[in-house]
Amino acid sequence: MAETLRGAVRQASGARACGMELVPFWDLELLGAATVLVVGRGALQDEIVRGLSRLGLGTVVVAEASHPLLSEPLPGQVDLIVHCGGDPCSRGGVRATCRRLAIPWIDVRLDVFHGLIATTLPGREATKEADGAAERLASQRESEIPANPAMAAIMGGLAAQEAAKVLLRAKGFPTLAGRICLVDGQSYRMSVIEPAIPIVA
């Protein structure tokens, strides 16, 4: 089913599981019943939506970072929000909405050769150290710099995988909750900042 939702596009994606039905521990029934809202724009948002579709997500709602969706009641049941826009105001709106409604959310950021993913579960915020690293990356990125398509594909794939793990966390899948993953596309290094000073949501 595809429908336009006041500027946000709702897409059915569960039919494109691409072989994941052959993985015995991959709960396609659970993922197929889930709804994920992806807030952002551009190549990174496109790659995240593509990854979610191929992992078997049932419904993906796509909204521009500037869309007023988050200041209004959310459309039906939303199980997870993925934010991939560079706008701090939009990110703050997602954070506030998820705190208020106890919805998990994933923050994905990208500059030309570097990326970041941070996951927040209800009641489990990122650490001050992780939050500081995220803000440093955001401050380095000029909003007019286009995303590197290769890095967008890498970060989009990692974000989609993290989203599926968050939705499947009751089955024991580990997530980045309260931590942050930094990806350096120049040196091909990944690092995870572990919790140090938790911030309670």
Image (tube, rainbow, N blue to C red):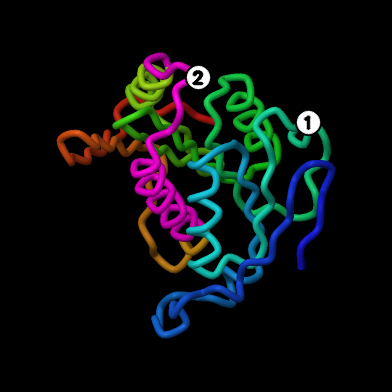
- Label whose residue precedes the other's in the sequence (2 or 1): 1
The magenta stretch spans residue 84: no
Q: Label 1's element?
A: helix
Q: Which residue is mark 2?
A: 144
Q: Is residue 82 above or below residue 20?
A: above
Tell me the quadrant of the picture where the N terminus can be found: bottom right
Chain part drawn in magenta: 139-166
Residue sitting nearer the eye, 7 or 183: 7
Dot 2 falls on a residue whose secondary structure is: loop
The main secondary structure of the magenta stretch is: helix
- Which amino acid type is shown beneath numbered disc 2? Glu
Graded by Cα atoms within 10 Å as few (under 14), some (14 to 19) or many (20 or more), the crowding at tag 1 reads some
* Residue at the extreme left: 187
Horizontal relation, residue 135 to residue 40: left or right: left
- The residue that disc 1 covers is 68
Q: Position of residue 161 (x, y in %)?
A: 42, 57
* Residue drawn at the location 29% of the way across and 35% of the way down: 182
